[in-house]
Amino acid sequence: RKQLFKLSTGSKALDKLLGGGVEAMSITEVFGEFRCGKTQLSHTLCVTAQMPGPNGYIGGKVIFIDTEHTFRPNRLKSIAERYNLNENAVLDNILYARAYNSEHQSELLNIVGCKLHEEAGVFKLLIIDSIMALFRVDYSGRGEIFDRQHKLGQMMSRLQKISEEYNIAVFITNQIASDFKSPELATRPIGGNILAHASTTRIALTKGEGAIRTAKLLDSPDLEEAEVHFLITSGGIDD
Ligand code: ADP
Ligand code: MG
């Protein structure tokens, strides 16, 4: 029987909002404007996923697909330090891949699938930071949205399948629409209905003063819509 684990975000408040943390066998999406903490949260999860947790979770390895070239080993070192973990061991447990275009991003998922099959039970978390950045560039024309959504849909169902088949948490980040004609549109994640339906849990991040950020839970199948504050610190996401 598969153990449904939850990964700590580094913030107790945010974990509570999520009913314990980022859940296995499903897709969790965070979206928000530039600098709201999506990449910092991704880095923090890279570390917390390696640590033992509730319900007999023993920790595991992480796969990080980086589409914006914002992965920073140095950040992981300071987060590892916060948790008194060996920084080199932490880095060794992260399988890193840089994606250069959306086609490459899906090819990487094929490789990920093989890796998960070969090393069953070793990996616990798959991160894609960010899911839409390359799609946005590759399908920028007005007439290309249908093709984009089609490819995106294929990728999302692959991610869903991977999360369930290998009992891992899939964590993706997303941008918001840069449409300032309507303020309401400008706070909406991109990717349309395809992404909205594929993500089991969606979290909207917004910037507060200084290191303060707000997380609002949306679309959860079993948790109430609520919001909490958290901090971005040198040791990663915290309260
Ligand atoms: P995005 O949502 O664009 O991915 P990031 O996750 O990169 O945003 O978050 C950027 C924020 O994280 C910035 O406000 C920055 O000040 C903060 N940050 C980055 N590194 C550190 C650090 N070492 N200590 C504290 N805050 C940091
Ligand atoms: Mg980022």
Image (cartoon, rainbow, N blue to C red):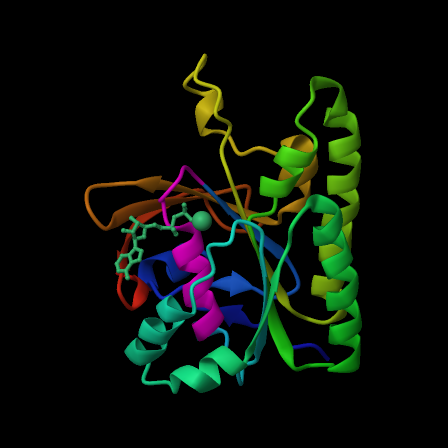
Question: Which part of the image, by quadrant, shows the N terminus?
Answer: bottom right
Q: Is residue 150 above or below residue 117?
A: above
Q: Is residue 199 above or below residue 177?
A: below
Q: Residue at x 62, y 54 (%)?
A: 27
How many numbered marks have been drawn onto this rendered protein structure? 0
- Residue 152's spot in the image, x, y percent? 73, 41
Q: Where the C terminus falls, by quadrant?
A: bottom left
- The answer to whether 201 appears left or right of 15 in the picture is right
**Horizontal relation, residue 82 to residue 15: left or right:** left
Q: Nearer the viewer, residue 19 or 112?
A: 112
Drawn side of residue 113 relative to residue 234, left or right: right
Q: Horizontal and vertical percent for residue 61?
A: 58, 78
Q: Tell me what residue is drawn at x 44 percent, y 28 percent.
A: 187
The boundaries of the magenta stretch are 32-47
- Residue farthest to the top, as pictured: 181
Residue 75 location, quadrant: bottom left
Give me the residue at 53% from left, 85% from top: 58
Rendered location of residue 228, percent (x, y): 32, 49
**Based on the displayed image, in which of its 4 quarters is residue 80 positioned?**
bottom left
Q: Is residue 38 magenta?
A: yes
Q: Position of residue 208 (x, y in %)?
A: 25, 41
| Res. 93 in view | yes
Q: Is residue 167 above or below residue 52?
A: above
Task: Name the foreground residue: 8 vs 87.
Answer: 87
- Occupied quadrant, residue 125: bottom right
Instruction: Say whether residue 8 is magenta.
Output: no
Helix, strand or loop for the magenta stretch, by majority: helix
